[in-house]
Amino acid sequence: MRSGFPLFPEQASTLAGRVDAIYFFLVIISGFFSLLIFAAVIYFAIKYHHRAGEEHAPGLVNDNLTLEIVWTVVPLALTMIMFVWGAKVYFSMSRPPNDSLEIFVVGRQWMWKFQHPDGQREINELHVPLGQPVKLVIASEDVIHSFYVPAFRVKQDAVPGRYTTVWFEATKTGRFHMFCAEYCGTQHSGMIGRIVVLEPVQYAAWLSGDTATPGAAMAATRPPADGSLADRGHRLFQQLGCASCHLPDRQGIGPLLHGVFGNPVRLRDGRTAVADESYIRESILQPQAKITAGFQALMPSFQGRVNEEELMQLLAYIKSLGKR
Amino acid sequence: MSNYLNVNYGVKSWLLTRDHKRIALLYLGAVTLFFFIGGAAAVIFRIELLTPQGDLVQAETYNKLFTMHGIIMIFLFLIPAIPAVLGNFLVPMMLGARDLAFPRLNLASWYVFVTGGLFLLGAMIAGGVDTGWTFYTPYSTVYSNSYVIATALGAFIVGFSSIMTGLNFVVTIHTMRAPGQTWFRLPLFIWSHYATSVIILLGTPVLAITIVLLALERLLGLGIFNPALGGDPILFQHLFWFYSHPAVYIMILPAMGVISELITTFSRKRIFSYQFVAFSSIAIAVLGFFVWGHHMFVSGQSVYAGMVFSFLSMFVAIPSAIKVFNWTATLYKGSVSWQTPLLYALGFIGLFTIGGLTGLFLATLAVDVHVHDTYFVVAHFHYIMVGGTIMGYLGGLHFWWPKISGRLYPEGWAKFAALVIFVGFNLTFFPQFLLGYLGMPRRYYAYPEEFQVLNVMSTAGASILGVGYIIPMVYFIWSMRYGPPASANPFGASGLEWQTASPPPTENFAATPVVTCEVYTYPSEHDRGANP
């Protein structure tokens, strides 16, 4: 985070430079056409200025089809470059690398809550390692929020009722602004925090709560006593009674959950769905929406019985289940 | 001589008038009032933003102020300003007609407009609304404790006045053109108002439907947008922008029509490529309906949907570019006289060019991800709405003021005000592009310190802009009494509206004019009337 009077944002992620390159291209194209128009307008207005009382008949100018075609096709071609380039980078933004560190984010009026895979939790502050892709799975407990880190050039709405994802790989250590970008009520502008990017060693120290490591002055947390996210999810899985139907030996009245995550699931109505985060979430909250082939629609809804953070713990547990 | 202003007197003769010219003036009064109320809200929150911390008003008040500013400016000023004031006055006159096709409907539209406006103001006086003019769900339907329903109902009612005006224009333009006035002999002002009317007729009902759904969810708890009830909050955004993106073109197209008239009149030269300029209005109206999803690139909609909307959005830039190029080319070898309306037109071209080109930044997916919901967007749409629409409106108001009032305004003051507005506008909004790319989100009551310098510049510009808007109001009112009388055609313009007295008689024309040539044909120099 900087003080003073900056005119351009810091670049602190692998995406930042790619976005800025398109931005500069757009600035150059826009600058060129703006100056062209301004210069032509001012030049014509002065050169053909008619003063009162002067004899000065306008010249005869015919329409010019060639000119019309040129100034239709040239801008069209340029906008197509903008489209393709912008879409290419946007596509990369939407595809987190497979080895991403996964962190769960819940937005609510008016704070950001984070859960690390090992179980550490933070509010309005997120520690991440340098040089490793980080994928955020985002949910909202109430209204729409938007997770925004200008230095990383990433933004993603947190939408109640579904998961959204965003990823980044930090290229600079330090602290960066984290904003809520979607208006969410009275304290919208107070829903801000910071991202702290640490060297991997310091990050590991931070995770373990080891204050002896250099840089660990920032250490704010210890490994939680209640275990990792998946451990907590496992306990919930027992407490909520999920385990009594989703048996690990394929004998349960619910489908086996081992190895389900990330793979296609055949549904009773013949369709196929990929068991991603949103699918698991829906299956817990609206079990009737998609029934796995070969099973009955017996599962009750857990809407109102688990909150967004618990859902994320269950999700982490289901993801942790290997193939059996 | 009897004209529409002095044919009879008294409040009743105005409030029950069916004369499109008097109705235009009723609208002028109403939109001017709303403009200054909406502007006052902006003044307060710009002062609040002088310092990083919130200190002048409370966060809740700030949120209500920007909501009020947006709702008033969009629904009660920008959408009706040019069509309902200048359009109402000029559409029949440019067609050589006595009135619009449905004079009673026209008067009704004003009453509907005022009723809706009073609803909106009433809701704001009662306690206000804090959802932003966008009413995003589920905040608006579940979480906001403000007067959402009354406000939404106000917007719903105002929408019907737009529909009435749009319907009146479409029918009038189709059926009441003067003998010999073929489609390609119509002023471009008429083409742009025709395109606007089509958007109004197709789009506004969707806004009405969306507001009804919103009210049903908020009042009765029907699950439409609220995910806790099985609804989808993104559905609201689709419905909202399906109207509200085309609404941007409802606001800008009429101004483009004004600019076409001004450029040709003050260059004394026919418009370059009439047909391209005319059809670009239609192209904007059609394409405008297929780009709404570009407001939702980071909402979690499918990546492929984002790509389709980005691709389509690029196409809207083309007809706008065609217009700008053709206006510029019209000046070439013209006989350019630097009168106030032309200054506004040139200002429009410059500011609209910047506004349009920065629209490309927002249509480009990866860049939009960064600047979406930041001040970059705020700056962009103010360049279009204020730099474009309001410049066009003021330019048009000056141009047709002698026709409307029968009086000339003071040219020196008018040029001065145009300059003040241009400078104030740029100082207000250009820094916001920089703020936006730096990452300052919009609708922020308090902000990090490093954004302060640019915010102070913006507030300074806003105070200059505010003064700039007050000056014309003062001299327009002054000119109604003290301005020198205007001749029938003080600018040597070519449209039919200049062939009758200023101000025109109630029936507009003594005899129906007959059109025998294309619209922008200028008589030779010495026939020209006196300059103001």
Image (cartoon, coloured by chain):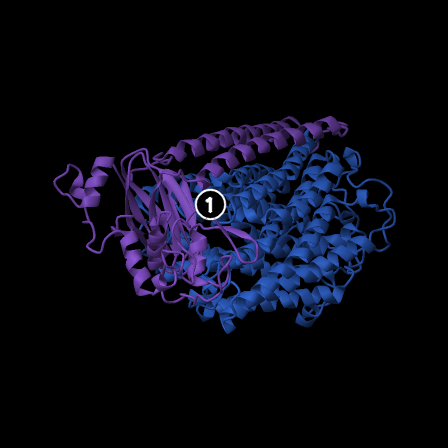
Chain colours: A purple, B blue
The quarter holding residue B492 reads: top right
Q: Is residue B69 left or right of residue A320?
A: right
Q: Which residue is mark 1?
A: B372
Q: Is residue B66 left or right of residue B88?
A: left
Q: Quadrant of the N terminus of chain A?
A: top left
The residue lying toward the viewer, choosing from B89 and B9, is B89
Q: Is residue A261 visible?
A: yes
Residue B78, image x, y percentages: 58, 54
Q: Residue at x 37, y 35 (%)?
A: A7
Which residue ends up furthest to the left in the rendered image? Answer: A212
Q: Residue at x 65, y 61 (%)?
A: B205
The residue lying toward the viewer, choosing from A297 and A45, is A297
The residue lying toward the viewer, choosing from A130 and B500, is A130
Residue B32, image x, y percentages: 57, 58
The quarter holding residue B114 reads: bottom right
**Mark 1 belongs to chain:** B
Q: Amino acid at mark 1?
A: His
Residue A306, image x, y percentages: 35, 63
